């Protein structure tokens, strides 16, 4: 493995840091408090080219290799204090756009990718259901064949961007007896008869990205809205998970680095009992732990990105990464609040927000418990 990034790659990371710091952090406390999704910031990211990272130029993107994209999203997470925005950007890039790039027809690519890249359209990945979360392939949403296409019936739950999405990549089963081999993917546009989305649901963290449900009631989709062949839905969904984790977790890694540096500055400046609080072992040890989590998380992240860039399997490594980095972000969030004391507990400080946002990382894209199951199975248990 070689993690000696080129000057161009490192320059991209720094450009993303500056762009995010200068553009994306205005009114952060109020937007988080009120659960406001900034379409202005979303458009700014599209105009800067961020939404094109997973899409070739011929479809409106500026596609780069995975290692470069990961480094860019790490920089974005460092510079952008809005973890909900970085989460949403990664969700669309890797679980909506990338499947269309890899598995969509030429007509689907031409129709859907340009507006997703330029910010005019927002896409949602709709697979989770009220009764199909960790057991994601036991879907209740049905797609029944009919003349010219399919009829969808069912409800999707905890869908990122459901309340505002213009397009949903929807997974339904055409034959429940086939298990995962009956799952099929469809591209369904907002406004289709029988398609309805909920309002945004309140949540503990990641408040600036809208999350809700989508219901399909006798919703007709044409055959040319199917992405890939019948029964390929499970493979399409699984394909993007490892890549998605690299880039979503890269943004978390950037946030962890910013969080640690903020804690170091505070520990140097804050004085109690005649000295900087960083001189007290209890404070210094917490910062040492934050650095250890950051470095071990970075090594796991870069290894998974390297494996995927070499087109190698990374199921075990991706599970180790997801488990370790997401839980490390939570632990470092707690340490950051303890270091800042009562000030860190106040909303206006912005310190407590990272902790609330970090908790979601132990749940989405496979819970920590599911990652432990995957790891145990890979070890032959």
Image (cartoon, rainbow, N blue to C red):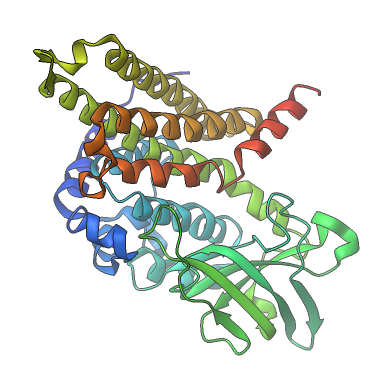
143, above or below 116, in the image: below
- Give left or right: position of 224 versus 41: right
Q: 44 and 307: which one is in front?
A: 44
Q: Position of residue 334 (x, y in %)?
A: 38, 32
- Give left or right: position of 257 versus 303: left
Q: Residue furthest right?
A: 177
Q: Is residue 62 visible?
A: no
Q: Position of residue 343 (x, y in %)?
A: 21, 38
Q: Position of residue 63 (x, y in %)?
A: 39, 50
Q: 162 and 3: which one is in front?
A: 162
325, above or below 211, in the image: above
Q: 59 and 13: which one is in front?
A: 13
The quadrant holding residue 337 is top left
The quadrant holding residue 128 is bottom right
Q: Position of residue 259 (x, y in %)?
A: 28, 33
Q: Quadrant of the C terminus?
A: top right
Q: 232 and 125: which one is in front?
A: 125
Q: Is residue 376 visible?
A: yes
How many marks overall? 0
55, above or below 304, in the image: below
231, above or below 54, in the image: below
- Give left or right: position of 246 versus 371: left
- In percent of the image, x 33 and y 15: which residue is there? 288
- In percent of the image, x 45 and y 39: which residue is there? 249
The quadrant holding residue 236 is bottom right
- In percent of the image, x 54 and y 73: which residue is there? 107
- In percent of the image, x 55 and y 68: which residue is there? 106
């Amino acid at each position: 493995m070689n993690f000696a990034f080129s000057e161009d790659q490192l320059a991209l990371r720094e450009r993303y840091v500056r762009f995010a710091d200068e553009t994306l952090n205005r009114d952060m406390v109020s937007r988080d408090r009120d659960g406001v999704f900034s379409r202005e910031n979303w458009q700014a990211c599209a105009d800067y080219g961020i939404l094109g990272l997973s899409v070739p130029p011929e479809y409106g993107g500026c596609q780069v290799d995975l290692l470069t994209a990961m480094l860019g999203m790490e920089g974005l997470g460092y510079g952008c204090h809005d973890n909900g925005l970085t989460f949403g950007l990664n969700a669309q890039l890797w679980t909506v756009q990338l499947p269309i790039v890899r598995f969509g027809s030429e007509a689907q690519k031409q129709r859907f990718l340009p507006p997703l890249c330029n910010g005019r359209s927002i896409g949602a990945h709709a697979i989770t259901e009220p009764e199909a979360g960790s057991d994601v392939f036991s879907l209740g949403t049905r797609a029944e064949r009919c003349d010219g296409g399919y009829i969808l019936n069912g409800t999707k739950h905890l869908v990122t961007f459901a309340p505002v999405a213009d397009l949903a990549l929807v997974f339904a089963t055409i034959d429940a007896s086939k298990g995962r081999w009956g799952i099929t993917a469809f591209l369904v546009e907002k406004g289709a008869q029988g398609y309805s989305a909920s309002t945004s649901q309140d949540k503990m963290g990641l408040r600036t990205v809208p999350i809700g449900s989508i219901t399909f009631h006798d919703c007709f989709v044409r055959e040319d809205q199917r992405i890939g062949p019948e029964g390929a839905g499970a493979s399409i969904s699984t394909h993007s998970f490892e890549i998605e984790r690299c880039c979503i977790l890269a943004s978390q890694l950037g946030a962890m680095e910013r969080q640690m540096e903020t804690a170091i500055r505070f520990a140097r400046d804050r004085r109690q009992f005649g000295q900087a609080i960083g001189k007290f072992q209890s404070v210094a040890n917490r910062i040492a732990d934050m650095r250890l989590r950051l470095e071990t998380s970075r090594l796991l992240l870069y290894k998974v990105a390297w494996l995927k860039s070499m087109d190698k399997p990374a199921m075990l490594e991706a599970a180790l990464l997801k488990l370790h980095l997401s839980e490390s972000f939570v632990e470092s969030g707690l340490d950051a609040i303890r270091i800042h004391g009562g000030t860190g507990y106040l909303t206006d400080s912005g310190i407590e927000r990272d902790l609330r946002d970090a908790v979601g990382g132990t749940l989405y894209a496979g819970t920590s418990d599911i990652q432990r199951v995957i790891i145990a199975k890979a070890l032959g248990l």
